[in-house]
Amino acid sequence: MADLKEIAGIFELDGNPVEVKPLGEGFINDTYVVTTDGPLRYILQRKNKAVFPDVPAMMDNIAAVTAHIKQKVADPMRETLTVIPARDGKLYHLDSDGEYWAVCIFIEDTVTYDVASTPEMARQGGVGIGRFQSLLADFDRPLAEVIKGFHNIRWRFTQWDGSLKADRAGRSAEVAQEIAFVEERRSQMLSFWKMVEDGILPLRVTHNDTKLSNILFDSRSGNVLCAIDLDTVMSSTSLNDVGDAIRSYANATVEDDPDYGKVALRLDMYEAYMDGYLSQRRDTLTASEKEWLAFAPLYITYEQVLRFLMDYIDGDTYYKIRYPEHNLVRTRSQMALLQSMEANYGAMQDIVKKLLTKFER
Ligand code: GN1
Ligand code: MG
C-alpha cells in the first residue's frame, strides 16, 4: 500500500500532511481525511479505476462543473467542492501501482446522513438537488460519459443478459425468483428510457448519484450546503436525480436493511422532497418531465435492483460488500422498496399534481 501521507503531499496542499485517516463507507472509492499543519483539512480519494475507466476525464468534468457553480453562489468554498490539483498541475495523481488519486478541500462544520429523519430534511435535500440542476442549467460544455450507459436501462440489459449467460459465480439458479422480478418489468422500464432516447425527456447536466449520503448539510443551520461525490456528473435526464434521491430519502430504512418488513416508501418524505425540488425547478421543467416525474423513483429503484442482483450473479465484482450475501440482501431490500413504490404510485402522481398547482404562477 502506497504511503498515504506521501501521496497527499503530491497535491497543492496549504501545509504539510500530518495525519491521514479513512472516512466513511463509500461503495466504490477509498476515501481519507488528510489533516495538515496548515489551516485546512482535505479529502484524499483513491478512485476506483475498475469503475471509472477514464479518471482524467472524470476529473475534468468535476473541475468544470464546480468552477461553473462557484461563479454563481454566495460562498464558493462551501457551496460546492474545491478540487486541489497535484503540484504538476494535473487534477489527479497516477501512482507507480497504476492507481489514481484525487484531492478536494474538506468542508468543515458539515454532516451527512444515511436515513432522513424528518420531512424537513427531505425538503432540504430536494432544494439541494433542484438548486444543483438550476445552477448548471446554462452549463454548455460537453461532459465526458464517465461510466457508459450509467442510468441507461437498455445498456444495463445488455450487461444483464451477458451476466446471466456467463453465470460466472454459478448463482443464477438460486436467484430465479429475483431474476423473474426483473424480467417482469423489462419492457415497462425500456419504454421509460425510450423517451430519453427519442428526446421527449431532455438531456441536462445531472449528478446521477443523489442518495442522501451524497448531500452535505451545514451542521450549524441544518440546511443543505451542496451535493458531493461528483464522480458521476454527466448528461442525462434530470428525473433520475429525483428518482435516486427518493430511493433513499423516502425509504423508511437503509437501502440494505435485511429486515424487508421495515422497507417502505414514506409518502410524507416523498412529498417533502418533491416540494423542495419543485420550489427550485418549477419554471424549467418541460411538460413531459412533469408528466414522468413520479415514475422516476420506480425506474431508478428498479435499475438498482438489477445492478445489485447482477453484481451478485457476477460474483461481487463491482460493489464493495461487508458479508457474502450482501448484494443479495441489497437486491431484496430494494425489491421491497420498489413494490412499495408500485403500490403508492397513484398517490405519488397525485402529490406531484398537487405541488405543480401550488407552484404555478
Ligand atoms: C454507489 O459511490 P457511492 O457509494 O455514492 C453507486 C451508485 C449506487 C450506490 C448505491 C459510481 O454510490 O450508483 O446507487 O452506490 N455509484 C457508482 O448505494 O456506481
Ligand atoms: Mg458516495
Image: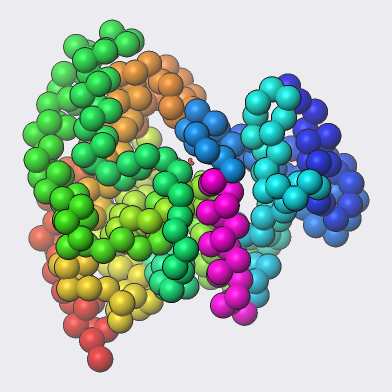
Residue 183 in the image, given as x and y percentages of width and height = 12, 31
Residue 255 in the image, given as x and y percentages of width and height = 37, 40
Q: Quadrant of residue 92?
A: top right
Drawn side of residue 282 relative to residue 280, left or right: left
Name the residue located 65 percent from the left edge and 29 percent from the top edge. 99
Residue 17 in the image, given as x and y percentages of width and height = 85, 43
**Magenta range:** 57-74
Q: Quadrant of the C terminus?
A: bottom left
Drawn side of residue 215 relative to residue 297, left or right: right
- Report the coloring of the rendering: rainbow
- Residue 331 in sight from this viewpoint: no
Q: Quadrant of the N terminus?
A: top right
Is residue 86 covered in magenta? no
Name the residue located 27 percent from the left edge and 28 percent from the top edge. 159
Residue 81 versus residue 141: which sits nearer the camera?
141
Residue 285 in the image, given as x and y percentages of width and height = 27, 73
Name the residue located 61 percent from the left edge and 71 percent from the top edge. 70
Q: Quadrant of residue 32?
A: top right
Name the residue located 26 percent from the left edge and 13 percent from the top edge. 166
